[in-house]
Each structure stands twice: as structure tokens, then as C-alpha cells.
Amino acid sequence: MGKRDTMTEKVISDFITPSEEITTADGEISSAGLLDEVNLYNLYDDRESPEQNAQRILEITYPTETLTTIIKNTARTLNGDDEFTEGGQIIGGGYGSGKSHIELVIYHLFNSPSIGQDWLDQQGIEATLPDSTRAAALQMFNLDTEYNLLSEAVADHLGIETWEGDTRLPTVHQIRDTLEGVPTLVLLDEFERWFGMADRAEYREDNKAFLQNLLEAAGRDDTQLSVFLSLLYENDDVQAVAQRTNPFTYDLSSRRDEKIDFLLHRLVGSVDDPPGIGDLAKEYTNVYRQNDQIQLEDYQHFQDRIERYYPFHPMALDLLMEKYSEQRISSDARGLLKFLTQILADTYSNVDLILTGDIDVFDYADRFQYIDNELVGKYINDYHRLQNSDDSFDEYIEELINIVLLHSLARAGEEGANKRQILMGTMRKGINAHRIIQTFREDVYGHAWHIHRINGEYAFDTDENPAARIEKKAEDIHKHDAIHRVESLVRRGLFDNHNNVYILDPVNTEQDIPDNKALKIVVMLNAKESYDEEFKALTTGQEREFHNTLALVTPGKRSSIDNNTGIIELARKVVAGEQLDREEEVLPEGFKEIHEQNKQNLHDRVRDKFGTVHRSTGRGLYPEDLPNGDHVDFYDATIDIVKPDYSHLKSEVEDAIEDAGAGGIQYEHLRNDFYRNTEYPTLTGDDELEDALDDLCRDGAIKAGNYFEERLPNVGNDTNLVHEKYVEEDDEDDETAEITIDTTGVTSAGDELDGDSTTGSPTATEGGSGGDSGVLECPQCRRELIGNTCECGFEFDASDVKEGKVTVEGATTNEILDEFGLDNEPSGPKTQSVPIMGTLEADNKPDMIDTLERKIGIEWDIHTATITVEGTLTTEDLEHYGIAAEALNEKVSVNETFEVEPDEPFSRQSFLSLVWDLNVPEHASLDVSMQVDKNE
């Protein structure tokens, strides 16, 4: 693992000196000369072994409280202290707990009393060793001679030829008599395994009996015998025998503090700067105090522990001891001391305190493989996956995965590191805790395929964690991308990807909802009390023409989607899964299933939020709930709700045609009215309107073109639709209406016509009665008629007089022709004002265009036109006039008149285009008057 710079000025080498046992001649730290494992059977080896060296064994021994108690009890027993009769002692514990080492120390103390007494005095242990002790240390599973009887093995190692009474199974008294008052020490190691061998089954009762007798003899005040029995607690028979005499029992498995003292004694030769270590412990504790993510029950106690455990952080050393104690392989459990030596060698000159994250798991992977080989293999895979291309790591990443692996060992997928353990495994003064957590969440979790989150902890597991990869990737997904995915789901998943379905104000998308006659379904993702403002913004707010072509679909009440945290987070996971599927060549097993489940969950969650369809009516929006059910097609369901009731539609169509009057209405204009006016039913297609017309025509309710009371085979844009109430009148009035000028009230001019002195006022049958001014009035505009023409465009010629279309009361045809100076030949085309009823008016340009489209015939020519515009100017309008002053917004009025007199008459379409292109302020009304040639 790459060494990082220390956050303090000092490192471990400034505070302590390693023990001589782990220091080489050139001053390097090495485990080469370390006695990390002892075996009693080496005491009797013909070759020299470290176990035979009493001086060395005692030098590396730390006098723990347990060892001190054992030494004192043994000395009292062997010295024949009458007040003490507890010579039997049981030492229990798992592999590597230190049982063999204690027995070896006891053996050397009493077998080499002069060396032993010096050591006791140096350690301040108040105990006196006998001058001579007969001692035997039997590691029963590795005796040089094959024994079936425990009594024979003990006798041989004590130098006893035969037990008193020449028996193979001596009684308590015979044991006492055989020892003859000589202080005797018997140490039995690995007895359970030896006792339980199948080949020794027929001797088990004898061996249990002798063990019981031996322990009972050790408890007599007349026998100077001390018996040690080490147990793994694997054999119930042996345990039962051992407890019958109620011996002293020491469980080394529960004495972790003593083992720590022993380990540190082996590693640390001297503490060179005790005050410095105290200051360092305080510094770390203050770092923990200042972080709200680390909560310790007793900060002072933890500070004391840092001093005691130095150079290891208490959490790091406790964790290693725990993981090693869970192994079942003896030699590797005892190898903890060697491993700690190697860790110290790696960190001695680089850090001030060895944290969990400083333990280089990758370099020592072989040691951890004995604990969980498969899990370490998965860790190695993720280790390489998180490396940069140059095999380096970004800050904290290597330390973080080491911490998680160490906490997961032996309990893969069940136990891991919590936030406190992650922080305390990496934090030093000057390191930001939030940065550590951020690095873990953003760069480790989800990227390491085998790290799972379990009950608030992060743990390695042998199974890959596709959910974690998706969750990690989801953290990088922007909220707008998640909402965009929901929008896509709505359009494609719920509304079957129809091209007339739109999302209102979509994110990440430029959208133009077309202003045409097709039905458009607009979907909102947020729920509101009222949607009137949204609908207004979609129609009049955007100056759309076809207001009655929109259906608004929304979530149910209080069921907003775009601000629902759960839905957004789920959408993030879906987007993340889709990105991983595109980017990664290899995905963990189970990824596809989880990704598909996320998509289905998102679909279900969003679907459950809908919903309501809002139809536009003359009284505002009318809401109607969408049906429920997994198999409901939202598009079809919306169409069914919006689709008009057929009988109601027929009634509305008939009323609209009736309102058009005797002149009727063209199909194109009727259809446009339905698509524009929200008071009409909303059409989902032209066929609905055409079907209604067909039925009305066959019923005789309307006349469509030339069809009446018969099927309407087709309908064109210019097909004229007339209500039946006007059909008969139109048929009786096929001839052109006559215009009659009544001159009976004229005094002077009338004499010129017929010599009659009758007085009256000129009148016209179509124009109404005139005044009594004594002049002829135009029947169209009521101005004084000068000759046979008027300023408004009214004109008549000889043919009108001859055909009787123009008559004058009291005058013959020739008299009229002479009076008005008309030739007998008909004149050319006449120009007439359109519309007949006067000037066209509209509140805005689109309405004016609509009016012109209705009033101007397709074949008409426009000779002159007058357009008047009145209104107020907005800031944008003012800029058109070169006025850049926002303060004048809507405070400046305009009144403009455009006189249009083209060299060649305008066609209908050319004139409409002219009006469309006319720059009209946003808030302005228009008046249009024209002189046209109908070309009839």
C-alpha cells in the first residue's frame, strides 16, 4: 500500500524503540528471529530449540495478572503451604490464546529456580520458588513414545520407574507415596485430542480415572504436587473429570487485555517519549470529539486506551485479534504476533499511529485467506477494479476497502464496518470526515462489486452486489435526467408512444405543441387544486387559434410526480441501470433482474399516480377520473373520456348551422369553429363532425350543398350548410331582389321624371325608407344619390332598369333612362362594398383574419381597402417604432389608417396575406372596409 504523508510532525519511530527480538543487527524491524509459536514437545528434543532456553522464554514474557496468579498458586502448592491446597489448575482457551506459552513459562520458572527467581524479583512478583522441583511438560499429541496410558506417560517424564504398589493405575495415596514429598510439577497440553483418539478408546476409563486421581492428589495438603491441564473444551468427558476436584480455572479467551499486554511487550522494547504519546492520544481524541459522526461513550477512557495500545490504534488491534481468534488453524492463529511485527515494520517511519486503514490487506492477503479464502479473492478482484491505470489509488480508496474487508472477515455478508469504524480507521488531524464519507459513497460503494450495505454497515460478500452498483451510479444522475426518464415512461409506457401526446414543460427538451386541428393530449406531472391557469397558458396565453383541441391529463389529487422523492430516486436507478448496461461489458449476476424490477417498480409507481382527464367546456375545465387497472391503456381511456357524446354533438352542429342564418355556413368554417371554440364538444377527429352532418342531412335538418334529405356522400371545405328553416325561403327567392327608388315625395326633381307634383322621399326596398329632404338617397348607405352611382360603391345601369331591378315610382323605363342619362346598352362589372352591412371589426389580428376568410368569396377581387388599427403599445411594440423605454409600456397609444389602392386588384389570398404580414400591436383592434368585384 502506498505510504501517505503523516499529518503530524512525528512518526512512530519518534515515540518508541522496537524490542530486540524483532530488531535485526542493522536496526531493521523483522519477524525473522521472532518466536511466535512455542511447543512443549521441543523441551525434550535432542536438537537445540528456543523452547529449551529458559532465559529467552522469560525475557519475552509479560507478567499478566493471570500468569502472576498461576505462579503464586503453584509456588504455594510446591512449597507445601498447609493453608493452600489447590494444586490443580485448568488453563482454557482457543488456538493461539497463549496456553502453551504459560505452561512453558511455569516449567522454566520451577525447573530453573535460580533464573526463575531473578525474573520474579525483576517483575515484582512476590513468590518464592522451591530450590528443586521435579517437572514434566507433556504435549500429549507429540510424545516421542506412543503411550496408551496417561499414568505411564507421566511416570516416564517424571523419571518414575513404577508407581507405588507396582500398578498401572495408582490411587491418590499411591501417587502421594510415590512422590515422597518432592515438589512435583506436571503440565498436560493437548490432552483432549490424545484422549479422544479412536485407537485409545479401550483405555479411556483408565485415563479418566488416573487424571482424576492426579488432580485430587494435587489438592491434598500432604502432597506437594501441582498439575496443569490445558483445555480447548472439545471433550465433555475430560471437562467433567477436570471439574470434579474444583480446580482453579483460567479462561484465556476472555482475557483480551492480557493478550494485548503480552503482544505489545513482545513488539515494543522501550517507550522513549511517554508524554509525546499522551499528547498524541489526546490529539486523536479531540478529533473524535469534534466530529458529530463519531459518538464515544467515554472519550477519556478511549484516550487512555490509545496510550496503552500504542503504536496500534485500539480499534485496529482489537479487530485483528478478533479475526485471528476466529480461525481454527493453530499455527496461523499464533501467527498474529508475526503479522503485527510486519505491520509495524511497514508503518514505523510513515505514520504516527497504526489505524485500521494502514493495514495493507492486499500485501498480506495470504494471511487473511486462512480466515476466508473466497472472500479475500473477491476483495482482490475489487482491489484491482478500483486501481488507476498506473496501479495507484485515489485518496482514501485503498484504506477504505481494507477497512471493510477486515470487518467482514469470517462473517462475510453478515457483518461489516459502520460509519464510525470507517472514519476512525482513516481519520487523522487535518483530515475532513465528510471528505472520507463522500469518497466512500462516490468512489468505493457501487464501484466495488462485492461491497453490500447491511443494516447500516458496509460488508464484503462473495456474491456481487448489482444493487449497490446501480445505487452508486444513480448518485451521479441529475434530477432532470430522472424526471426526463419519467416523462419518457409516461409517453411511451402509459400512452403507447402516440405522437399527439405531450408533456407540459418537459425538462431537457425543446417542445412545440402544434397549433392545428388534431387532438393533443398534454400530460402534467404535478398535481394542483386548479389547472385553469395552465390551460389558459396553453391556449390564449400562446395566442393559439385552435383552443378546443387540447385535453389535459394530470395526476390524482395530491399525487405529484415531479417532486416525489421516492419516484425520482427510483427513476435515477433506472437511468443508472440503463447507462451501466450500455457502458459495461461485464455486469454482475442478478443485474438484469434488479434493473428490470426497478423499471417495473417505476412504471407501477408512476401509473398509480394517474389520474384525471380535464376537458375544456364553456364553463371551464371538467375533470373526469381515468379508470384503474394494470391493463388499462391510458391513451384509449383518455380518448374515450374526451370523445363527444354523439347526440350532443349533432345538436350542437345543428344549432351552429341554424345560427349562421339563411346564408348558411361553409363546412370549413363550421369545422374551424368547433376546433376553436371551447364551448363546443371536443372533436377527436373530423369523422365525428362529418358523421353528424351526414345524419342531419338525411334527417332533413340541414341542406348540405345540393343534398337534402339524402345521404351526404362527401363534404368539401366550401360545401355550404344551411338549416332547413331557411331552405324553403331560399328556393322561392331565386331571382335577384329588386331595388325600388320611391320618388313620390320629391317636389322639383320629380317633375323632371313624370311631371307629377307628388312629394315624398326616395326609398329602396332593401335599404329601408329615406328621409324627407327632397333628394334621392342611395338605398345602400343613405347618402344623396348623384346620378346612378354612390360613394359607397352602389351603382345601377340600364339593364338593372330594364330588368326591373331598379324602379322609380311614377316613372317609366325610358323616363328613368333619360333622367339618369343611361344608355340602352348594359354597363360593365359593378363594384360593391363588402360586407353589405358595413365595415368589418375585430379585437385582434387572428380574429380579423378569421372574419375576412368567412366574408370574402374565393373568386372576389379587392380593388381598394381601408385598414384602421387602434391600440396601446407594449415595450416590444415600442422598439419597432425606435422607442426603447420600458417605462412607457402600454402607456403609448396608436391610431393608424392604411389606404390600400393596388394597381391590380388583390385576390382573396393575397389580401389575407397582406393582413397577416401587417405589423399589428399585441393589444390592438382592427377595422377593415373594402371595395370588391364579386365576379358574379
Image: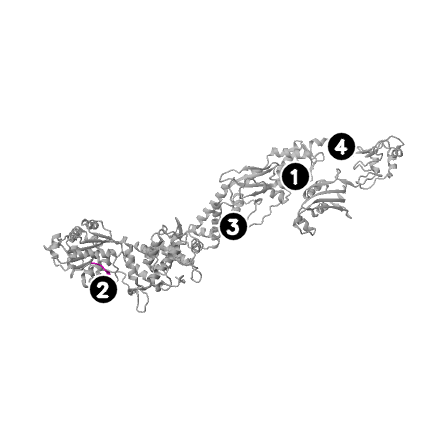
Q: Are marks 2 and 3 in contact (CB under 8 Å)?
A: no
Is residue 189 visible from the viewing direction of this image? no
Secondary element at tag 4: loop
CA gap, disc 2 and disc 3: 74 Å
On the image, the x and y values in percent for residue 272 come to: 32, 64
Which scheme is used to colour this image of the protein?
A: one colour
Q: Quadrant of the N terminus?
A: bottom left
Marks 1/4 in contact by CB < 8 Å: the verdict is no
Q: Is 200 left or right of 591, judged from the image as shown?
A: left
Secondary element at tag 1? helix
Which numbered circle lies on residue 733?
Answer: 4
Say few, some or many: other residues with alpha carbon within 10 Å of mark 2 (under 14 / 14 to 19 / 20 or more): some
Q: Which mark is residue 673?
A: 1
Q: Which residues are magenta?
A: 121-126
Which is in the foreground here, disc 3 or disc 4? 3
Mark number displayed over residue 181: none
Q: Disc 4 residue type? A: Asp
Please tell me which of labels 3 and 4 falls first in the chain.
3
| Badge 3 element | helix
Q: Which residue is mark 2?
A: 55
